[in-house]
Amino acid sequence: MIRLLVFLAVVFALGLGFAWLADRPGDMLVTFNGYQYQVTLMVAAVAIVAVVAAVMIVWWLIKSLWNSPYTISRYFRVRRRDRGYQALSTGMIAAGAGDGALARKKTKEAVKLISSDQEPLINLLDAQASLLEGDHKGAREKFERMLDDPEMRLLGLRGLYLEAERLGDRNAARHYAGRAAAVAPQLAWAAESTLEELTERGDWDGALKLVEAQKSTRQIERDAANRRRAVLLTAKAQALVDSDPNAARTAALEANKLAPDFAPAAVVAADLVIRQNDVRKGSKILEAAWKAEPHPDIAELYTHARPGDAVLDRLNRARKLQELKKNHAESSMAVARAALDAQDFATARREAEAAIRMDRREGAYLLLADIEEAETGDQGKVRQLLSKAVRAPRDPAWVADGVISERWAPVSPVTGKLDAFTWRAPMERLGQLIDSDTDVAVPAITAAPPAAPAEKAIDIVADAPVEEPVSANGGEKDKAVAETVGEAETIGQGSELPPLPDDPGVAPEEEADKSPRRFRLF
């Protein structure tokens, strides 16, 4: 666009110049080699422009002829490169589709047409083709060669990390992930694996630095980064409680500031503050956490914040918690426990029953059983409450990857994932119905042959083999089923009458319609 405007401006300027000369007539006298040439100014101007244009055209022709070998070679080189990129693109698509043969074929074509130094993706396609062919050793060697190229280093580390994961070599996988995270902390796979390694070693400071790097690269949101920092700082505070109480307190208070509703952080921070005789500040921390989400650990620490308090004082503190979070099962449970300690059985019973109405669960029934035993000693009622507790849903606990823990932990003991424990009721699981190692199935029952017309004919219907779980009582149910099947077959065979020689018998469909009673095993 700019060139077109410049061209139009030049043409416009030339037109103005020729018009200006045409309006001002004059002659131009040139003496050369004893001859005089007299022409008008317009002719002279046109001649000058024509000479300049001719010189430019001649120069362009000479330059084109001089550069023609390079131009021709560049044309073929560009054409060869385009064919190579086309082969590379087709190979990458084939590798993504799982076509190892086509990926290998296009890899060879791309290598012939493009230099691997010019296009690093050829190395990736070569490694992917080796993986599709099952040559994992060759693929690892190709990924290792990528480590020497700064542009391909992260790709090589990623490939080696996946291969180590496939082989189950967790240490090698974390080694490659750590190298990648040191260069590029924004890589999620590298950062997460390195974070698991750091937390498993208990290197909380290193984990905090990595989370801060993730936050600076905007790999994770601000709220998620604050949550992770709160979890790591809580774990750090727990680790430093005995060795460095001051550092533990600083870490716990920062964790509580980042996540005020995080019960473990609040409990650790309040406990450390109370140990340093600042009960008022510790109580405020617990009250704020209790308002966000009541937790039994908060209630336990809050009611026993002052060791010298009497049982009535602890009951009053529990009632204060109840005022902060009314109509909540944990509030009623906290008051009921404190009332039981204070021998105020009427209050304890009332609050325990209120907790059951709000959240029917095992702990409330057990607490009510303790109250009944302490107040009346009626073992019948106690056993009745215990039986209800067995059938009631379980109390909330710290659960992570199927592991139930009474105490919070920063990482999962199964997968090593950070912040895996959640406070919830464990999922109920059915026990094994089969005690033996082999499954016991009811044998297939074949249909009885067509029988003669009868008022009380019995059909045994079995469409397909059926597997039934065997109960833990030693297979008595299966024996009963087998006996029933045997009796049914005996009755069916016994009720069958031999057909007459010329009587074709009754069709099975008609016999089924005429049978007033049908016995179906399944």
Image (cartoon, rainbow, N blue to C red):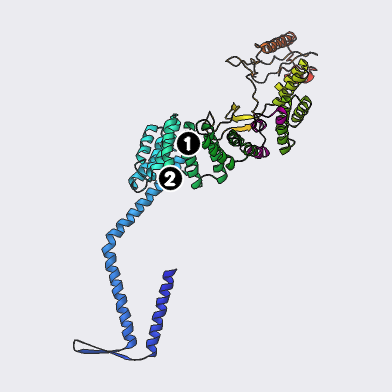
Disc 2: CA contacts within 10 A as few (<14), some (14-19) or many (>=20): some
Task: State the residue in front, 328 or 271.
Answer: 271
Q: Residue at 43% x, 29% y: name it.
A: 169
Q: SS of the residue at dot 2?
A: helix
Q: Tell me, yes or no, whether the two marked residues, 1 and 2, touch with CB atoms within 8 Å.
A: no
Marker disc for residue 90: 2
Disc 1: CA contacts within 10 A as few (<14), some (14-19) or many (>=20): many
Reply yes or no: does residue 260 show up in magenta: no
Number of callouts in the render?
2
Q: Locate residue 85, reporting x and y percent.
A: 39, 49
Name the image quarter holding the C terminus.
Answer: top right
Range drawn in magenta: 285-314
86 relative position to 303: left or right: left
Reply yes or no: does residue 291 show up in magenta: yes
Q: SS of the residue at dot 1?
A: helix
Q: Locate residue 495, reporting x and y percent.
A: 75, 9
* Marks 1 and 2, how far apart at CA: 33 Å
